[in-house]
Image (cartoon, helix red, strand yellow):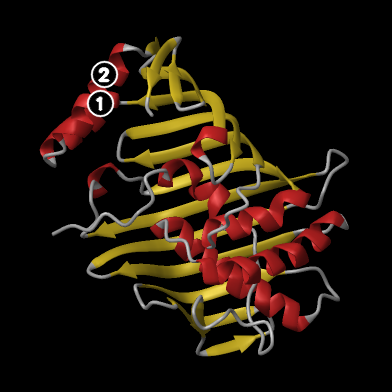
Amino acid sequence: MKQNFIHPALAYVLPALAGLALPLTAHAAPPAACAHISHDSAQGASYTGLVVRTGDGRSTLHAAHMQFAAPAGSSPDSVHAMAEAASLLLLSSVTGQHNAACSSWLSEQGTAAQAILASGKSLGMSWKSASIVVGTAQVSVGTAQLQLQGRTGTGRSAATLNLGGLHYHNVANQGLLPTQAHAAFSIPVNELPALLAAIGGRSTAAPAVHVDIAELRAAQKDSVLSGHGQATLTGDVSATSASGHLEISNLEGLISTARAEGQIKLATALVLARLVSHRSGNANTWDTSWSSGVLTVNGFPLPIQ
């Protein structure tokens, strides 16, 4: 039986997701209830045989190689801790799992990353030949790269995320999930700790995180989803809002794939989406907004709550 452990918004938020963090050190290691992180060897901030296992043992990340790039002069312990946190966030963002035991530690690493970015310096991280496993379900990632630029005069950090060589096993709707994705977005630097804690932890404070997505692109065979927009993310759905533009090329192919995999409800939803879409060449497009539990698509309000 295929397991559905991938966050529903993988193609959209994995970008905001995936990273913005830090790895390894004796005194800054994550709490045991949060995760256990190890590696075969390390040379500076370059790790081989990296393994991240959640505290409950439900999910793991294995990466043949992980590289974390921090400014010269950064504390080795801080760099290690940031690299570990980044890897944990990659695992959390794909599985959609949140653990309250991780919240404080991730927020601490986010504060360290915030200080670096606030000074105008950049951070970068990459993983090669990674595998994320939950039970019998597995996602393989050929390469994952996240770059965070130093804070600009607007107080924001620009970021780019690239994922390539994505493959799935025993994952629901895997024929519809992207095999490669790219995102360019920005976030206020002072909201970075809250974002890290929200991705991998579980906060009751529901802080608002304001994300601008300049470019989003996710491809599956001949179907490509692209778009741009803004979102205010919180832990409270009634206070979360978003707006943007989306388009999908070869929507018919996605509908056919959904039907072939027996995902009739999904296929029906895509057909309905096609009905309210606009045409632009070979693509279907939508201008969307979400606020107070109401999704508006091309001017049509669709109450979801």
Q: Residue at x 25, y 32 (%)?
A: 254
Residue 252 makes an appearance in the image: no
Q: Residue 119 bears which disc, if any?
A: none
Q: Residue at x 82, y 62 (%)?
A: 115
**Residue tagged by mark 2?**
272
Are the residues at dot 2 and dot 1 in contact (C-beta closer than 8 Å)?
yes
Q: Image quadrant of residue 24?
A: bottom right
**Residue tagged by mark 1?**
269
What quarter of the picture does the N terminus occupy?
Answer: bottom left
Counting from the top left corner in percent of width and height, residue 192 is at 70, 54
Q: Is residue 71 left or right of residue 296?
A: right
Per the model, the C-alpha gap separating discs 2 and 1 is: 5 Å
Amino acid type, mark 1: Ala
Amino acid type, mark 2: Leu
SS at mark 2 in the image: helix
In the displayed structure, would residue 149 be above or below residue 217?
below
Q: Residue at x 51, y 86 (%)?
A: 38
Which residue occupies the foreground of this view, 92 or 234?
Answer: 234
What quarter of the picture does the C terminus occupy?
Answer: top left
Crowding at dot 2, Cα within 10 Å, few <14 / some 14-19 / many 20+, comes out as few
